[in-house]
Image (tube, rainbow, N blue to C red):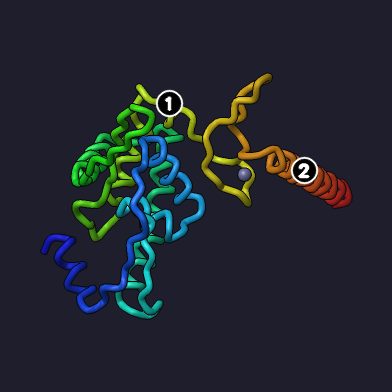
């Protein structure tokens, strides 16, 4: 059974998802929302990516729909983090690209027109044309393809904070002077990581000294 039908059947009698005002996401907005979702794993940004609108789920937290959505959201985030790491480490295979290409192709784009000061602007609302049992969903696949495209700078600029307790993905910070910052998402994490490394060096050198003393005594 196609994913959409299976999910609809499971959620029958649970029509309690409310859509909030739809807003078109520009290309960088889709990439930014995907990276933000990988960092926070929050339900709201996942729904925003999935359906193009920040949906609200009013269902009982123990209902099948709420459980399904929660599980899918967690699985989607775990897989997305693996993919973002693969992009940073340049380990993306052709098979993955094909999967993302196929999934992204099921996005449904609807034009959204704005007209201000004599200027027409067209942007696109995107929503999932098909729901899949396994991640990644179509909007996340689109974000991953945008990150892989060498004509765009998103992928080249993607970094992972090296401060162990952080693990946040971010885009390279280019200060007005000095080198671009790719290692840490913020200065505070650089200082904390340096302090942790210094403490680790002290601990290791103490351990080595102790071992040397024990060897001399025996
Ligand atoms: Zn950080």
Determine whether, in the image, residue 184 is placed left or right of residue 39. right
* Quadrant position of residue 93: top left
Asked whether the residues under the numbered discs 2 and 1 touch, taking CB atoms below 8 Å apart as contact, a structural biologist would say: no
Front residue (pair 158, 162): 158
* Quadrant position of residue 131: bottom left
Under circle 1, the secondary element is loop
Establish if 173 lies above or below 32.
Answer: above
The residue lying at 46 percent from left, 56 percent from top is 41
The residue lying at 36 percent from left, 55 percent from top is 21
Q: Position of residue 42 (x, y in %)?
A: 46, 58
Q: Position of residue 162 (x, y in %)?
A: 60, 41
Establish if 49 lies above or below 122.
Answer: below
Ligand 1: quadrant of the figure = top right
Q: Closer to us: mark 2 or mark 1?
A: 1
Q: Is residue 85 among the parts visible in the rendering? A: no
According to the picture, the residue beneath numbered tag 2 turns out to be 195
Number of on-image labels? 2
Under circle 2, the secondary element is helix
Q: Position of residue 106 (x, y in %)?
A: 19, 46
Front residue (pair 120, 151): 120
Mark 2 → mark 1, Cα distance in angstroms: 32 Å
The N terminus lies in quadrant: bottom left
The residue lying at 41 percent from left, 61 percent from top is 74
According to the picture, the residue beneath numbered tag 1 turns out to be 153
Determine whether, in the image, residue 8 is placed left or right of residue 118. left
Q: Position of residue 44 (x, y in %)?
A: 43, 58
The residue lying at 13 percent from left, 60 percent from top is 2
């Amino acid at each position: 059974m196609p994913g959409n039908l299976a999910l609809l059947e499971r959620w029958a009698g649970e029509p309690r998802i409310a859509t909030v005002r739809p807003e078109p996401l520009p290309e960088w907005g889709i990439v930014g929302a995907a990276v933000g979702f990988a960092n926070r794993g929050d339900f709201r940004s996942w729904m925003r990516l999935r359906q193009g609108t920040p949906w609200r789920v009013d269902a009982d937290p123990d209902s099948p729909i709420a459980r399904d959505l929660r599980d899918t959201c967690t699985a989607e985030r775990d897989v997305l983090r693996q993919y973002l790491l693969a992009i940073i480490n340049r380990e993306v295979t052709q098979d993955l690209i094909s999967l993302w290409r196929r999934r992204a192709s099921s996005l449904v784009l609807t034009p959204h027109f704005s007209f201000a000061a004599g200027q027409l602007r067209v942007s696109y609302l995107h929503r999932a044309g098909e729901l899949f049992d396994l991640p990644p969903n179509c909007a996340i696949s689109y974000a991953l393809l945008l990150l892989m495209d060498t004509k765009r700078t998103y992928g080249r600029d993607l970094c992972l904070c090296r401060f162990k307790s952080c693990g946040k993905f971010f885009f390279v910070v280019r200060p007005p002077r000095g080198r671009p910052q790719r290692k840490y998402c913020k200065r505070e994490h650089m200082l904390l990581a340096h302090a942790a490394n210094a403490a680790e060096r002290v601990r290791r050198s103490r351990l080595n000294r102790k071992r040397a003393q024990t060897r001399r005594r025996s």
